[in-house]
Amino acid sequence: MAIKLYSFGGGQMVEAMIRAALKKKVIEPATTSVTDISTDRVSYLAEQYHISASQQPDWSAIAEADLVILGVRPQDDWQKIMKELVEHDYTKDVLSIVAGVTVKQLSSQNDRFAITRIIPNTLTDVAMGYSGVVKNDRANQIVIETFLNSFGKVDYIDESLLDVFTGYGVAGPNYIYNFLISITNAGVLAGMPRQQANKLALENLKAAAVFVEQSGKHPAELLDINNSAGGVGITAQHELDKSSFAAGLENAVLAAVKRTKELGK
């Protein structure tokens, strides 16, 4: 049975989640509603996905919802929304994507709230990647996981690690895209046509990831297999070891985590 969904906020992330959930038939247009302050956004969502969209909350639809998404910005009045949910006696699940707002803060209006806080992944259109999830004991795990699994995987983490999860996990595709560009450019630099270089780089990237997962081996073990004495692989490895490749990636993650903490404040 499809989840009845209501979202406060219809931004890009909410749209991505709804699009994926509709595709997987976890939700249906007839029982999906969104409130957004933008008239353009309301019109677009209604026309694009055939869902109910309005600038003012539809409390009859909210009362019927199995899951309410709190999809507003941190600087918006999310406290008012939570207060109104209390006033209208909403007792089912609230799923928050509001950056920097803790489960405790979200529960401040009423300790009976079923709260789940997530940092959604950005690979919703391919239904891959992990969303970082923190929930209280009242949250309906079946409803939450059914919805979240429609656009990826679920990783339950300590709330203190959400900023790290954002800077490392959610921003993770950025690091991979940069690697793919760099390795393609390396092939072009060596004399290979760009289209062919990109094709080989992408296939190696996908195949290596699958091999690590299926083999259960540490990547260092797989490097040992590929790096024969005095051969091509170990020669390339020597140059990588001399470079700032690893430190550059590590510094990028640390910078992203730091920025996440700054934005959360």
Image: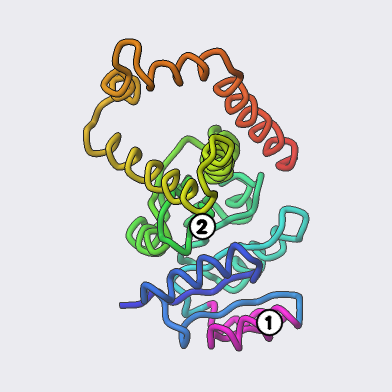
Q: Amino acid at mark 2?
A: Phe
In terms of secondary structure, what is the magenta stretch mainly?
Answer: helix
- Counting from the top left corner in percent of width and height, residue 186 is at 55, 36
Bin the neighbour count of mark 2 within 10 Å (Cα to Cα): few under 14, some 14-19, many 20 and up. many
- At which x and y percent is residue 3? 39, 74
Q: Based on the picture, tell me whether residue 187 belongs to the magenta stretch.
A: no
Q: Residue 49 lies in magenta, yes or no?
A: yes
Q: Is residue 130 above or below residue 4?
A: above
Badge number at residue 181: none
> Badge 1 local density, few (<14 within 10 Å), some, or many (20+)?
many
Residue type, label 1: Val
Of the pair 190 and 133, the residue shown nearer to us: 190
Q: How many marks?
A: 2
Identify the residue under disc 1.
Answer: 42
* Quadrant housing residue 247: top right
For the point 65% across and 49% down, which residue is it? 99
Q: Earlier in the sequence, mark 1 or mark 2?
A: 1
Q: Is residue 72 left or right of residue 24?
A: right
Between marks 1 and 2 in the image, the one whose residue lies nearer the viewer? 1
Residue under label 2: 113
